[in-house]
Amino acid sequence: DGGITQSPKYLFRKEGQNVTLSCEQNLNHDAMYWYRQDPGQGLRLIYYSQIVNDFQKGDIAEGYSVSREKKESFPLTVTSAQKNPTAFYLCASSRRMGDTQYFGPGTRLTVL
Amino acid sequence: AQRVTQPEKLLSVFKGAPVELKCNYSYSGSPELFWYVQYSRQRLQLLLRHISRESIKGFTADLNKGETSFHLKKPFAQEEDSAMYYCAPAADGLTFGKGTHLIIQP
C-alpha cells in the first residue's frame, strides 16, 4: 500500500484560494492519473500523464492544473476557477497507460 | 464517445446467493477490461482484469463482445464482498463506470 501516497488526507481552504494536492509514487510507473470521486458519479478523470514532462486533459480538467517534472510526482492544483471544488480526489499510477492502476488513499478537499 | 454503464447503483443480495454486477461498454476498438473494488475504509484496488483470466475472491467476469458486456459474477456471495465495484474499460481513454454498491445481507 505504501507505493503511492497522497497528502494531506483532509484539506480545508477558503473560497478563492488555490490549493495543491500532493501525489507521490515509488513504483517506477510511467503513467499517473488524477480522478475526482463524487457520490453517484463514480470516478471522473481530471488529468493524466503518460511520461515525465507530458500530461493531457481528462474529462473534467477545467479549473485544475498539473505538472509532471519528476517521474515520482504528479501534483494537482485546484484553482479558484473550479466552480465546485469540494470533493474526494484520487491519484493513481500504472506501469504504462491503460495498465492496472494503483490508487492512493485520497485527499478530501473542503472549500469553505 | 467511449461509455461504460453500470445500470445498478445499489445491489442487495443475501449471503450465499449468486451475485451478478452488470457492466456494458461502448467502444470503437477492443478495450482492456478491468473491475476495481473499494471496500469500506480501504483504497480502490484491482479486483480482476480480463486479460489475466484469473478468478479473484471467487469472482469471474466474462467478456461478451457481441453484447459488449463484462459482467462480474460470483456463485455464492459472502458478507465480506460488500463494497463498491467499478467497471473500467481502458482504451485510448480512461473511463470508470459510476459504480455499483453491493450489500450482502446476513
Image: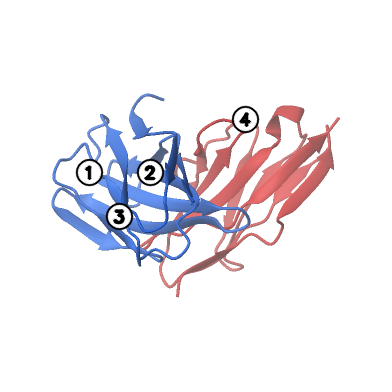
Circle nearer the N terminus (2, 3) = 3
Q: Which mark is residue B57?
A: 4
In front: label 3 or label 1? 3
Separation (CA) of disc 4 from disc 3 = 30 Å
Label 4 element class = loop
Separation (CA) of disc 2 from disc 1 = 14 Å
Visible residue check, residue B89: yes
The x and y percentages for residue B19 are 75, 44
Residue under label 3: A48
Residue type, label 2: Cys
Q: Please report contact status of discs 4 and 2: CB closer than 8 Å, yes or no.
A: no
Label 1 element class = loop
Separation (CA) of disc 4 from disc 1 = 29 Å
Q: What residue do we see at 13% from left, 52% from top? A: A53
Circle nearer the N terminus (2, 1) = 1
Circle nearer the N terminus (3, 1) = 1
Q: Quick check: do tags 4 and 3 share a chain?
A: no
Question: Which chain contains the residue that carries disc 4?
Answer: B
Question: The chain drawn red is chain what?
Answer: B
- B73 vs A96, left or right, is right
Residue A24 appears in which quarter of the rendering?
top left
In front: label 4 or label 2? 2
Residue type, label 4: Lys
Question: The chain drawn blue is chain what?
Answer: A
- In which quadrant will I find the N terminus of chain B? bottom left
Residue under label 1: A30
Q: Residues within 10 Å of mark 3 (few under 14, many from 20)?
A: many
Label 2 element class = strand
Q: What residue do we see at 38% from left, 43% from top? A: A91
Question: Which chain contains the residue that carries disc 2?
Answer: A
Separation (CA) of disc 3 from disc 1 = 11 Å
Residue under label 2: A91
